[in-house]
Image (cartoon, rainbow, N blue to C red):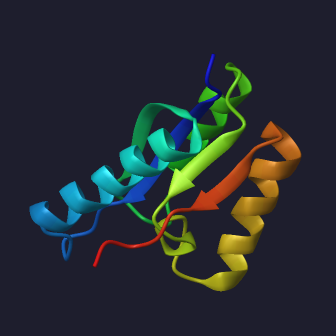
Amino acid sequence: MKPLAYGYMCVTVESDDEQLLRSERLLVQYAEAEGYRLGMIFYDYAPGQLRTFAALMRALQCSEAYHVLTPSRGHLARHPVLQRALIRILEDNADAELIEVGEPE
């Protein structure tokens, strides 16, 4: 059985529907190409409030998922220090790895 991975994307008012669809497709294509089973994609509509990140953490801790796919670290947080802190939380509290699949062109 393929290992389970979750997706994580930040959705802002600047995000247009086509860009979001391309980002989703990239997550799906990456998961298929690399042998993952993509579960739920978590959408963060309020960057910086961490509710969606907390929901992701709960899902990771209650499942056999150890990978989080995202277009880039910028989807976790805008500031590099917060990005590193959240990645550390993924690693330390859920034994999970963040995988950046790239932004759509």
The residue sitting at 50% across, 66% down in the picture is 48
x, y (%) of residue 4?
Answer: 60, 28
x, y (%) of residue 92?
Answer: 88, 48
Left or right of 102, for residue 100: right
The residue sitting at 57% across, 45% down in the picture is 34
Figure check: 67 above or below 40:
below
Figure check: 44 above or below 6:
below
The residue sitting at 20% across, 70% down in the picture is 15
Nearer to us in this view, 71 or 89: 71
Figure check: 94 above or below 85:
above
- As drawn, the residue found furthest toward the front would be 33
- As drawn, the residue found furthest toward the left would be 17
Figure check: 32 above or below 92:
above
Nearer to us in this view, 33 or 56: 33
Left or right of 29, for residue 51: right
Image quadrant containing the C terminus: bottom left
How many marks do you count on the picture? 0
Left or right of 82, for residue 20: left
The residue sitting at 72% across, 37% down in the picture is 66
Image quadrant containing the N terminus: top right
x, y (%) of residue 32?
Answer: 46, 39
